[in-house]
Image (cartoon, grey):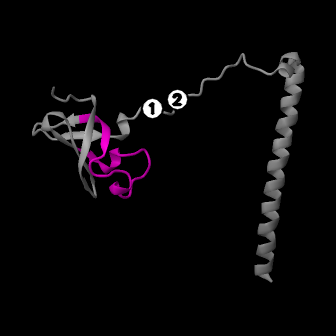
């Protein structure tokens, strides 16, 4: 069965270069995964991510007129940045008993406490920078 563009297929790494990896596909076809298509993260060395004879899933990006097959490991992975499903109906018993005004008041109190913590951190950092600056000037 020939490979088609957009298809996700299994392959085996047959060679690693500084610009990517060669992948053996079905029917003796070979394709190339460019270094930019290995991971969503920056890849400096292909061998840090892939090993020879490793089995991988790849997506067929393109097939040239000459038969060169461009592949992607990165795009073959399922998307993981889906929003987290939140069960809004799930609350503890104490929350159920609070009125809207009580919940709002609690939220504002917690928010102010967080803001105070951030301000105190900034003040501590600012004092440390001012001290070191004044000692340099002396």
Which residue is found at the position 88% from the left and 16% from the top?
A: 97
The answer to whether residue 54 is magenta is yes
Please tell me in which quadrant of the rendered image residue 32 appears.
Answer: top left
Horizontal side of 80 relative to 101 (left or right) equals left
Q: Which residues are magenta?
A: 32-61
The answer to whether residue 34 is magenta is yes
Q: Position of residue 128 (x, y in %)?
A: 79, 67
Which residue is found at the position 80% from the left and 69% from the top?
A: 130
Q: Position of residue 108 (x, y in %)?
A: 85, 32
Mark 1: give few (<14), some (14-19) or many (20+) Cα within 10 Å: few
The alpha-carbon separation of the residues under discs 1 and 2 comes to 7 Å
Mark 2: give few (<14), some (14-19) or many (20+) Cα within 10 Å: few
Q: Position of residue 18 (x, y in %)?
A: 28, 58
Which residue is found at the position 80% from the left and 55% from the top?
A: 121
Q: Residue furthest front?
A: 53
According to the picture, the residue beneath numbered tag 1 turns out to be 79
92 lies above or below 122: above
Contact between labelled residues 2 and 1, with CB atoms less than 8 Å apart = yes
């Amino acid at each position: 069965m020939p490979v088609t563009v957009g298809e996700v297929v299994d392959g085996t790494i047959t060679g690693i270069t500084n610009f990517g990896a060669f992948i053996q596909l079905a029917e003796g076809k070979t394709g190339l995964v460019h270094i930019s298509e290995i991971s969503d993260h920056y890849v400096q060395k292909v061998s840090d991510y892939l090993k020879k004879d490793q089995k991988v899933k790849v997506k067929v990006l393109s097939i040239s007129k000459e038969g060169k097959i461009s592949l992607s490991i990165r795009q073959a992975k399922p998307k993981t940045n889906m929003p987290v499903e939140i069960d809004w109906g799930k609350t503890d018993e104490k929350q159920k008993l609070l009125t809207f005004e009580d919940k709002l008041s609690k939220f504002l109190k917690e928010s102010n406490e967080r803001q105070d913590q951030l301000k105190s951190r900034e003040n501590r950092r600012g004092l440390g920078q001012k001290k070191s600056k004044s000692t340099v000037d002396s």
